[in-house]
């Protein structure tokens, strides 16, 4: 008796697809509108400046260290959804990012008129100095991008899919509705990407 093998077409999830459009949709939804993406880039720039500037000028190395030390705690507390720490507030992130933008812009203007030149008997570290200057300059648009993403997601946080199915209007939390967006938790503006609990398990928060 012969067996007939049949194939069943299973629709795959968009996130598992390698189609360029699916990849772009994933980046647009989960990466570009997540301020942690820009924090990671800024941390990398800070490390690069510290390592490169150690051979040029210790003040430039301190600038890179300042960028790294300022961004790393913000990145860490961006994942704390249930924390009431001051570094989870959007206002704290705004203050740090705006301060860094002003300081780094002022340093760039100063270096434009007073360039740092490190030369020995037969050599000059012009390439290293240029790399540090470019890294500092590159950090400014990423700081501004992080500010814009924070502002947008804080003003228009993603809606809970369960609440979106309920009839509107619905008053879920009056106190949260009256709370200014600038004092909200930065994690409220990003989608919860923690693993979903399997059957029989409870997600711990």
Image: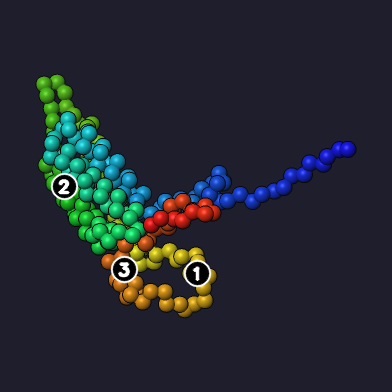
Quadrant for the C terminus in the image? bottom left
Secondary element at image label 3:
helix
Question: What percent of the width, then of the height, locates residue 185?
Answer: 31, 62
For disc 2, the marked residue is 107
| Count of marks placed on residues | 3
Is residue 84 rendered to the left or right of residue 199?
A: left
For disc 1, the marked residue is 164
Q: Nearer the viewer, residue 40 or 103?
A: 40
Quadrant of res 94: bottom left
Q: What residue is shown at x 22% (from left), y 34% (from top)?
A: 51
Is residue 152 rendered to the left or right of residue 50?
A: right
Marks 1 and 3, how far apart at CA: 20 Å
Kindly tell me whether residue 145 is visible in this rendering. Answer: no
Q: Earlier in the sequence, mark 1 or mark 3?
A: 1
Quadrant of res 138: top left
Secondary element at image label 2:
helix
Q: What residue is shown at x 72% (from left), y 47% (from top)?
A: 8
Disc assigned to residue 181: 3
């Amino acid at each position: 008796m012969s067996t007939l093998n049949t194939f069943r077409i299973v629709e795959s999830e968009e996130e598992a697809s390698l189609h360029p459009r699916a990849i772009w949709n994933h980046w647009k939804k989960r990466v570009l509108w997540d301020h942690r993406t820009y924090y990671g880039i800024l941390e990398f720039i800070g490390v690069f400046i510290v390592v490169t500037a150690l051979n040029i000028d210790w003040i430039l190395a301190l600038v890179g260290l300042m960028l790294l030390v300022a961004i790393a705690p913000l990145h860490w507390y961006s994942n704390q959804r249930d924390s009431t720490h001051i570094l989870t507030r959007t206002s704290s992130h705004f203050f740090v990012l705006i301060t860094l933008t002003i300081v780094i812009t002022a340093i760039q203007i100063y270096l434009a008129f007073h360039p740092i030149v490190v030369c020995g008997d037969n050599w000059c570290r012009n390439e290293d100095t240029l790399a540090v200057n470019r890294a500092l300059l590159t950090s400014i648009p990423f700081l501004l991008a992080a500010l814009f993403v924070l502002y947008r997601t804080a003003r228009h946080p993603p809606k809970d899919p369960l609440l979106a199915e309920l009839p509107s209007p619905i008053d879920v939390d009056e106190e949260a509705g009256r709370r200014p967006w600038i004092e909200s938790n930065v994690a409220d503006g990003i989608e919860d990407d923690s693993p979903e609990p399997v059957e029989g398990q409870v997600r711990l928060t």
